[in-house]
Image: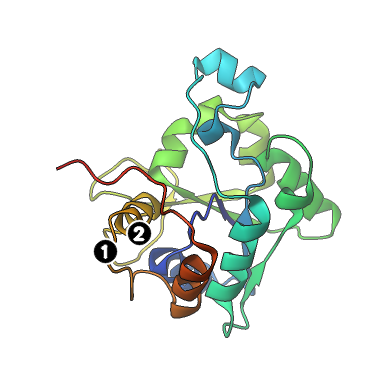
């Protein structure tokens, strides 16, 4: 399970998914866009109040992010877009998704976290239960970052982020080859990210 905001999905997500599939012998990689990524949007939740998170970032509607994920993974028979968190009302809690997957008979779940998400895990809903329900593996965002004792995903270090893609679009810079071509065309067609603040000089 590879969850996230995917705003937008980029080639780093695809490389990560393929490396996880190969390294951990997964028959399928579920890409699960968060409907309300409350840690980013600042939704009023007990977790955000406890962590003192109140800032809000505007996130592209879940249906659009799910469609971009579907476009991005098309052609890989081992990849699947899972829209359950987009369809679910309220904040998107990983623990709820893991429970649903277990109830569907998926007993061995590998949960992929970026090193930044891992650092934030104590602030998530029921982090201990997340550890119980899934085998956590960590993708480094920067060389040498801590994996908290969890297994590390072996993959090339790609210095690309959704934030950088959005800022490039806002600045009128090209994003070809940073995202799949179908995603680039969708962003252009739908006029996404043009209102984002451009990168600082």
* Residue 145 horizontal/vertical position (percent): 28, 43
Graded by Cα atoms within 10 Å as few (under 14), some (14 to 19) or many (20 or more), the crowding at tag 2 reads many
Q: Is residue 134 above or below residue 93?
A: below
79 lies left or right of 166: right
Q: Residue at x 66, y 67 (%)?
A: 81
The secondary element bearing badge 2 is classed as helix
How is the rendered protein coloured?
Answer: rainbow
Q: Is residue 126 left or right of residue 176?
A: right
Residue 70 in the figure: left or right of residue 21: right
Task: Tell me where residue 125 appears, x and y as whole percent.
Answer: 65, 29
Disc 2 to disc 1: CB gap under 8 Å: yes
Identify the disc placed on residue 173: 1
Query: Looking at the image, which residue is at 54% across and 64% down?
Result: 190
Which quadrant of the rendered structure holds the C terminus? Answer: top left
Residue 134 % position (x, y): 64, 48
Q: Nearer the viewer, residue 18 or 26?
A: 18
* Above-or-below relation of 99 to 157: above
Q: CA distance from mark 2 to mark 1?
A: 6 Å
For mark 1, give the secondary structure. loop
Judging depth in this view, the residue of 130 and 189 nearest the camera is 189
Where in the figure is residue 177, as x and y percent of width and height?
A: 33, 75
The answer to which quarter of the image holds residue 181 is: bottom left
- Residue occupying image coordinates x 78% and y 51%: 87
Find residue 129 and name its label: none
Residue 84: quarter of image: bottom right
Q: Which residue has dot 2 on it? A: 169
In this view of the protein, which residue sits in the foreground, 28 or 164?
A: 164
């Amino acid at each position: 399970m590879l969850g996230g905001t995917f705003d937008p999905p980029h080639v780093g997500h695809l490389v990560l998914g393929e490396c996880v599939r190969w390294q951990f012998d997964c028959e399928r990689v579920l890409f699960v866009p968060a409907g309300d990524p409350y840690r980013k949007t600042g939704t009023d939740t007990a977790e955000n109040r406890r962590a003192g998170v109140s800032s809000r970032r505007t996130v592209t509607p879940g249906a659009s992010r799910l469609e971009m994920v579907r476009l991005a993974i098309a052609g890989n028979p081992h990849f699947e877009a899972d829209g359950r968190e987009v369809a679910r009302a309220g904040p998107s809690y990983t623990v709820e998704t893991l429970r649903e997957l277990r109830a569907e008979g998926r007993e061995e779940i590998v949960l992929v976290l970026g090193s930044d998400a891992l650092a934030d895990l104590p602030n998530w809903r029921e982090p201990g239960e997340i550890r119980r329900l899934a085998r956590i593996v960590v993708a480094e965002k920067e060389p040498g970052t801590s994996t908290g004792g969890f297994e590390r995903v072996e993959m090339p270090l790609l210095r690309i982020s959704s934030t950088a893609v959005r800022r490039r679009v806002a600045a009128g810079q090209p994003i070809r080859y940073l995202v799949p071509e179908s995603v680039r065309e969708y962003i252009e067609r739908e006029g996404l990210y043009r209102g984002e603040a451009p990168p600082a000089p």
